[in-house]
Image: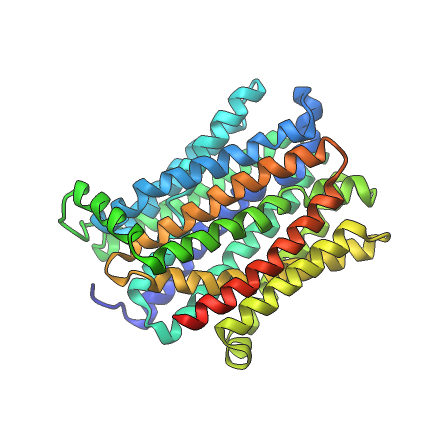
Amino acid sequence: MALLTPSQERRHLQLLGLAGFASMASMRICDPMLVVLGEEFQVSTGEASAVVSAYAVVYGIAQFLYGPLGDRVGKLRVVSLAVLACAVFSALTALSIHFQMLVILRGCMGAAAAGVIPLAMAWVGDQVPYARRQETLAKIMSATVLGMMSGLWFGGFTADTLGWRGAFAVLSGLFAVAAVLLLRQLRGQGLSRAADATGFLTSFHTTARLLAMPRVRWVLAVTAIEGALVFGPMAFMPTHLHEHYGLSVVAAGSVMMLYGVGGLLYSQMARQWLASLGERGLAKTGAGLVALGFLVLAWGIASWMGMLACLLAGLGFYMLHNTLQVQATQMAPAARGTAVTLFASSLFFGQSIGVLLMAQSVDRGALASAFSAAAAGVLVLGMVVFRLVGRH
C-alpha cells in the first residue's frame, strides 16, 4: 500500500479520530446510566449492566468479520460504513420501548462500532513506520479518550436531567456527521476501491493461521485478561462513586472523566515516557497505577479520594494498554487488519466476562471487594506483560 503524504495522513487521522471519539462515547455512555435504567425498567443495577455486556460481547464476535473484511475491501471503507450503521442504530436505541429491546439494540450498536477503532489502528499500522507508531497510536488514543470522557459525562448528565434517550439521539447525529465526512474523503481521494483481491474464505484461513502463532496467542490472551480486570470494573466505577461516595449520577459521570484525563496525560507524554521507561517499563508502571487506583476507589472515605483513584486508574490503564496496542499492530504485519481486530475481539470478550462477574458483586453489595480482587489481578498481569514483551 502506498504511503500517504504528511498532509493526507493528518487529514485521515483527524477523521479517524472523530470516528473513534463517537465510537468510544457510545461504548461508555451507558456506564453512568445503570442506576437510572434499573429504576425505569424495574430491574436491578446488575441486571441493567446487560446493556454494557451485550455491547461488549457482540463487539468481540463481530471482529471475526471485520478483520478479514478490512483486509479485503479496504480498512477506511469499512470504517466509513460502520460509522454510518452506528448512526442508524443509535437513533433506534433512543426509541426503545422495553428493556429487552434496549439490550438488543445495544448489541447492534456494538456490532457496528466494532468496525471503527480496531480498523483505525490497523490502518495506522499499514501507513506509519514502527518508529512513529506508538506515538501515532497515542494521538488516535487522545480522540478516543475524549470520546470516553464525553460519553461518561453526557450519559450521566442526560440520565439525570434530560432523560437517557436524548443521549442516544445526540450520539446518532455525531455518527452521521463523521460518516458523511469519511465517505466524502474516500470519494475525493479514490480510496474506496478494494485493497485486496483475495477470497473471503482465504481471509478466515488467515485467522486460523494467526491463531497458530505463539506470539499472537500470548498477546490475545493477556489482552482478554486485561479487558476482564480493567474494563469490567470500569463499567461499575460510576455506580460505586454514586453508592459509596454519595455522588449524584451526573456528578459520578463527571468524576469518571478524570479517568480520561489520565489517558490524555499519557497521550501527551507518551514519547517522553516511552524514552525513559521503555515498553516494558510502561506496562509494569501502568499496572501498578491501575491497582493503586482500584484500591483507593474501593476503600476511600472522601470524595477527593474517589477522584484521585479515577485519575490514577486512567493513567495506568493507558500506559499498559498502549503497550499491548503496539504489540498487536506488529504481531502479524502481513495480515494486520485481521490481527488487530482479533486483538479487539479478545479485549471485549474479556470485558464481557469482567462485567458479568462484577454484576454479581454489585447486587450483593460487594463492589469494594471486587475492585480489590481486580487490583491484585492487574499487578500479576503487569509482571506477565513485562516479561513477555522482553522476550519479543
From what the image shows, is residue 18 above or below residue 131? Answer: above
Question: Is residue 51 or residue 334 the one in the foreground?
Answer: 334
From what the image shows, is residue 307 above or below residue 245? Answer: below
Q: Write down the quadrant of residue 361 in the picture.
A: top right
Task: Name which residue lies at 46% across and 61% down.
Answer: 324
Question: Is residue 383 or residue 98 the one in the foreground?
Answer: 383
Q: Is residue 239 left or right of residue 147?
A: right
* Residue 161 can be seen, yes or no: no
Quadrant containing the N terminus in the rendered view: bottom left
| Residue reaching furthest to the bottom | 276
Residue 299: x and y, percent?
Answer: 80, 51
How is colour applied across the structure in the image? rainbow
Residue 15: x and y, percent?
Answer: 40, 56
| Residue reaching furthest to the right | 301
Residue 123: x and y, percent?
Answer: 32, 58
Q: Is residue 34 left or right of residue 212?
A: right
Q: Is residue 74 left or right of residue 84?
A: left
Residue 120: x and y, percent?
Answer: 37, 55
Quadrant containing the C terminus in the rendered view: bottom left
Task: Name which residue lies at 26% across and 47% down.
Answer: 208
Task: Name which residue lies at 21% across and 45% down.
Answer: 205
From what the image shows, is residue 368 above or below residue 54? Answer: below
Question: Is residue 49 or residue 386 the one in the foreground?
Answer: 386
